[in-house]
Image: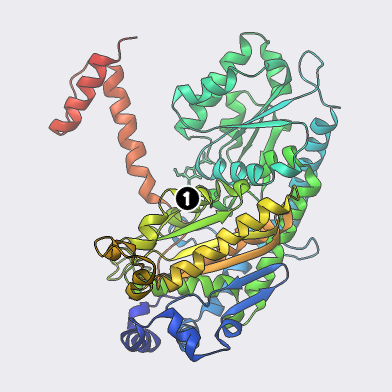
Amino acid sequence: MSLKNNNPTKTIAWGKLNNHFREIKNKKISKYFDENSNRNNELTIKWKDFYVDFSKNRLEKKTINLFTELLKEIDLKDSIDKYFNGDKINKTENRAVLHTALRAENNSSLKLDGVDLQSKIKSAKNKIKRFSDSIISGSKKGYTNKSFTDIVNIGIGGSDLGPSMVVDSLKFYKNHLNTHFVSNVDGDHVNEIIKTLDPETTLFVIVSKTFTTQETLSNATTIRNWFLKKAKQEDVSKHFIAVSTNLEKVISFGIEKDNIFPMWDWVGGRFSLWSAVGITISLSTGFNNFEKLLKGANEMDVHFKEAEFDKNIPIILACIGVWYNNFYNCESESVITYSQYLNQFAAYLQQASMESNGKSVDRNGEKVSYSTGQIVWGEPGTNSQHAFFQLIHQGTKLIPTDFIGFAQSLHGNKDHQNKLISNFIAQTEALMNGKTLSEVKESNNDSFTTPFKVFEGNKPTNTILIDKLTPRSLGKLIALYEHKIFVQGVIWNIFSYDQFGVELGKKLANTILEDIQSNFSYDHDKSTNNLISHYKAKNTD
Ligand code: F6P
């Protein structure tokens, strides 16, 4: 069964939210705190090792209650059940969306089209474990009988961003293997990576759900040719493995059947790091840590399924996002991670969120009359404070921001950690309170510069403070955002799990490639024709 079909703006609750918005839109967040000494408790969720404070927002408990009414009116519960039960909620591709099954408890049973998924998942996990154990321990060797030292993940989009972000985020837990990621079809990317590698000790993991992606196949072919400059054809099986749904294509590329790890059409690329797509995670940190990551995600799944709407972290963050997107008309939201380990988190989230909810046709097939997916962006703090925070503090745009931080550092340097977290907390305080004209005047005698030093404040933030960055807490954090994306897609009445928007560019790139490679005349618009001619004239080496 597919998801229900409701235009959110036509619901009774949306109407109430509109009226409520008119009443409170200009109210200062700081004023709410003056009026209600219990605000912080009302608008904070403490769950396991997560402390989620959403009190520094331009909303009140009533706002959350009205959103809860909306979620009941559109029957979010029914959507959640369909999501977890394997209904084909990816209707435009006629697929289930079951990345949650990959991290479900081993004893849970789930059938899809009559086939038991748990046994498939279990056998894939066993294969990942056996394989990563053998590489990490050195029992599996390369073609000259040396142990492996380096792993190269060849993939793009969901076959790159998730594993790459997690491997980087869990660098503290890594073993002796060095992992590299080749994604861009830019030949300089692959060449920069292979120039440092020894083919005798490098394992290549080709990750492509479809095994038709131009970037991945070009990079895999270049790497195989480079490998074959030293090794022989029969050595390929010792150094190349693949993760894909497309067995035929993988085999015709020359990968042995035993070296193929499964992927399934009920797992979307951007939600696939929990499957064998995450094999680099298991190789880099050990299977045990990979399992902890899955376990953490499963804990968030259970919380999402079971917690009341108004105490449910993904649901609350989703509603707050909709509040700013559809009522305050904010175009973007930023995510600032106060951990250098989470350097790639925003990039990962950009695909997860924007490829999912960057849609403008509703579930009726009609153009939506309201705004959908936000632009997501961000960088780690404190670096970003010295880059784009100026605009968040004093620019003309309202940019709701998620602050993500960890109470404990991994290397235990308290001095640095205190400084980092002071910044983390201070920014949310400054964004909320700002600095008034009279406050500026108190410390500034120069009347000319006074207006430039005023901070309006009232800038909304969510603070997610987690005890410590571990595989398990990272699993929870990623799953939190996955479910936020799901809930927003449900509210916006769109299909979040297809990605037709990336197809046109791919097709046209192939046409232009033919034009570049042939001597025939080409027939595009004038700008495109001239660009092709200019490139051909300049690409002389
Ligand atoms: O470009 C879009 C996309 O289809 C993503 O959704 C996907 O993660 C990526 O390409 C890679 O696809 P594949 O795993 O099939 O190579």
Q: What residue appears at the point 67 percent right and 75 percent down from the top-left corner?
A: 46
Who is closer to the viewer here, 74 or 40? 40
Classify residue 34 as left or right of residue 500: right
In the image, residue 35 above or below residue 368: below
Question: Quick one: which residue is furthest to the front in this view?
Answer: 445
Q: Position of residue 112 (x, y in %)?
A: 64, 61
Q: Position of residue 305 (x, y in %)?
A: 64, 74
Q: Secondary structure at mark 1?
A: helix
Figure coloring: rainbow
In the image, residue 309 above or below residue 150: below
Who is closer to the viewer here, 198 or 453? 453
Who is closer to the viewer here, 527 or 196? 196
Instruction: Tally the numbered discs.
Output: 1
Q: Position of residue 202 (x, y in %)?
A: 69, 23
* Mark 1 surroundings within 10 Å by alpha-carbon count, few (fewer than 14), some (14 through 19), many (20 or more): some
Q: Position of residue 192 (x, y in %)?
A: 53, 21
Q: What residue appears at the point 51 percent right and 31 percent down from the top-left corner?
A: 216
Residue 9 position by quadrant? bottom left
Residue 456 position by quadrant? bottom left
In the image, residue 128 above or below residue 135: below
Residue 392 seen in the current view: yes
Q: Amino acid at mark 1?
A: Ser
Where the C terminus falls, by quadrant?
top left
Q: What residue appears at the point 49 percent right and 58 percent down from the top-left corner?
A: 335
Q: What residue appears at the point 52 percent right and 20 percent down from the top-left corner?
A: 191
In the image, residue 52 above or below residue 359: below
Residue 1 seen in the current view: no
Question: Quick one: which residue is furthest to the left in this view?
Answer: 526
Q: Is mark 1 within 8 Å of ligand 1?
A: no
Which residue does the numbered mark 1 point to in the structure image?
Answer: 384
